[in-house]
Image: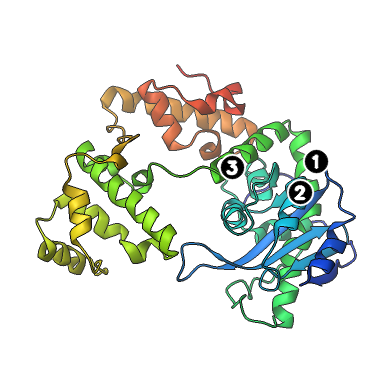
Amino acid sequence: METSVRTPVPQTQPPARRRWLDSHTALAEWLAPIAADATVALDTEFIRRDTWRAKLALIQLAVPGEVGLVDPLALPDLAPLAQALARCELVLHAASEDLEVLEQNLGLRPARLFDTQIAAQFLASAPPASLKALLEARLGVDLDKAESRSDWLKRPLTAAQLEYAVADVAHLLPLAELLRSELQTRGLLAAAEEECERLLARAGREDRQPQQRYRRLDLLAPERQRRLRRLLLQREHIARDRDRPRGWILDNALAWAMAEQMPAGVAETQALARAREVNCPRQIEPWLELLKADSHPLDEGFEAAAAPLDNAQIAHFKRLRQQVEAVAKDLGIASELLAPRRLLEQLARGEPAEELNGWRGQWLKPT
């Protein structure tokens, strides 16, 4: 990752003290000195293999000089923790999955967030690197990621796991302080904070257009897109109720094939699954009924994919991209951060873009 002119800073701060928090008394004592407006670094370790909800295995919290390791397996009631953290500013790196896990397991929706990955995006002309690379470049810290895929649900945790858990969160506060300072100097702090707010807003929002996750959705006719959306929304309801992975309920590739080819019956659906080497639901008939219905309550709010750009819009898109690349170069940020492809396509079509009401509107002037 290209970073702005800053050499690695040797790590001079003393190692953080570590405390294992596996009782309500220990957790309350650790949280007591934390003020309502404090800044707390946070990370989580979780497993998501055979469930819809992630299994939370560990919560790492850091304040200056100390790390608290919260054991959710020993503390089924984490409401006091959620109440305390809701008052604080949380510092995370690449926070989207952690935010989902915190909401599912603690009912926590933070009021304030500083995401060091987002902050780093505004200080580089290329997409951001991992936390490991960022810590090495900014703080001279070599973060060992060997334990990241270990079994975090097993107790007791190994010494290597504990060391990794502490290191993964202990450096976030000094990293955030360094990034904030540089963002302030470059006049980009408000923009980074706005993007963090956008991430928080998205984290608490149910995805009502899951079909939009497919690339080249426009290859499907709008009517087929609508039927695909039905399958995906129904799958989400079942996966949540049964607490099973979405793909165990209905595979993504099979859902697309069913919407595209509209199989006549069970045998044809099974053939589609075999051709794609994916599992087929044991009870196919309900999915076929849902697929073929002329209308369904799940169709409410359906949004079809935009049609491909025509020749005039393509030419406009290219002009916009050139303008964005020039502005991004002046700002020293990645052009994809300033204007993702989706936003450029919206502007090329002449559609309103909500993002222009924020920091991007300072530099992007649709023509």
Residue 40, horizontal then vertical, whole percent? 78, 52
Between discs 1 and 2, the one toward the N terminus: 2
Rendered image: mark on residue 257: none
Residue at figure coordinates x 87%, y 68% from the top left: 15
Using the numbered discs, state the Cα–Cα distance from disc 1 to disc 2 in whole angstroms.
9 Å
- Amino acid type at image mark 3: Leu
- Amino acid type at image mark 2: Ala
Residue 56, horizontal then vertical, whole percent? 61, 66
Using the numbered discs, state the Cα–Cα distance from disc 3 to disc 1 in whole angstroms.
21 Å
Q: Quadrant of residue 344?
A: top left
Classify the position of the C terminus by image quarter. top left
* Label 2–label 3 contact, CB within 8 A: no
- Amino acid type at image mark 1: Ser
The answer to whether any part of residue 11 appears in the image is no
Residue 58 drawn above or below residue 300: below
Say what secondary structure mark 2 lies in: helix
Is label 2 or label 3 in front?
A: 3
Residue at figure coordinates x 45%, y 64% from the top left: 243
Q: Nearer the viewer, residue 354 or 50?
A: 50
Rendered image: mark on residue 176: 2
Rendered image: mark on residue 199: 3
Say what secondary structure mark 1 lies in: helix
* Left or right: 9 in relation to 192: right
Instruction: Residue under label 1, please give it.
Output: 181
Q: Nearer the viewer, residue 292 or 11?
A: 292
* Label 3–label 1 contact, CB within 8 A: no
Q: Quadrant of residue 57?
A: bottom right
Is label 1 or label 2 in front?
A: 2
The answer to whether any part of residue 202 appears in the image is yes
Residue at figure coordinates x 61%, y 42% from the top left: 200
* Left or right: 14 in relation to 24: right
